Image (spheres, rainbow, N blue to C red):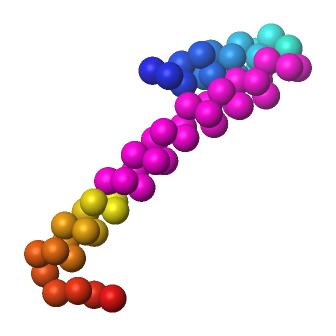
């Protein structure tokens, strides 16, 4: 729900042709997506660590 204002600004900016609104909306979306990338990296790192601890090492 953090990216909702960004999506709204992109949609409204493109519909009403306000030139500054959609780039700001895209910037908000990029800022809101940063925690998702961090969460994905932490989850995948944890999955690899768990796999390595239970099975033979692959590296």
Q: Which residues are magenta?
A: 19-43
Position of residue 38 measured from the top left corner of the image (x, y, whole percent): 46, 47
**On screen, residue 31 above or below 48:** above
Q: Is 29 colored magenta in this rendering?
A: yes
Main SS of the magenta segment? helix
Position of residue 24 measured from the top left corner of the image (x, y, whole percent): 76, 24
Q: Residue furthest right?
A: 19
**On screen, residue 18 above or below 48:** above
Image quadrant containing the C terminus: bottom left
Residue in view at x 46 percent, y 41 percent:
36
Residue in view at x 70 percent, y 31 percent:
26
**Front one among 14 and 53:** 53
**On screen, residue 41 above or below 24:** below
Position of residue 16 measured from the top left corner of the image (x, y, whole percent): 80, 11
Position of residue 8 measured from the top left corner of the image (x, y, whole percent): 62, 16
Image quadrant containing the N terminus: top left
Q: Is residue 51 left or right of residue 5?
A: left
Q: Is residue 42 left or right of residue 13?
A: left
Q: Quadrant of residue 33?
A: top right
Q: Is residue 17 left or right of residue 54?
A: right
Q: Quadrant of residue 9?
A: top right
**Front one among 35 and 30:** 35
Q: Residue furthest left?
A: 54
Asked if one can make out residue 11 in the rendered structure from this viewpoint, the answer is no
Q: Is 18 colored magenta in this rendering?
A: no
Residue in view at x 23 percent, y 86 percent:
57
Residue in view at x 40 percent, y 46 percent:
39
**Front one among 30 and 17:** 30
Count of picture labels: 0
């Amino acid at each position: 729900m953090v990216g909702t204002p960004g999506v709204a600004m992109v949609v409204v900016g493109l519909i009403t042709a306000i030139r500054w609104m959609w780039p700001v909306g895209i910037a908000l979306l990029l800022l809101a997506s940063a925690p998702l990338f961090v969460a994905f990296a932490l989850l995948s790192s944890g999955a690899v660590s768990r796999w390595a601890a239970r099975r033979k090492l692959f590296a």
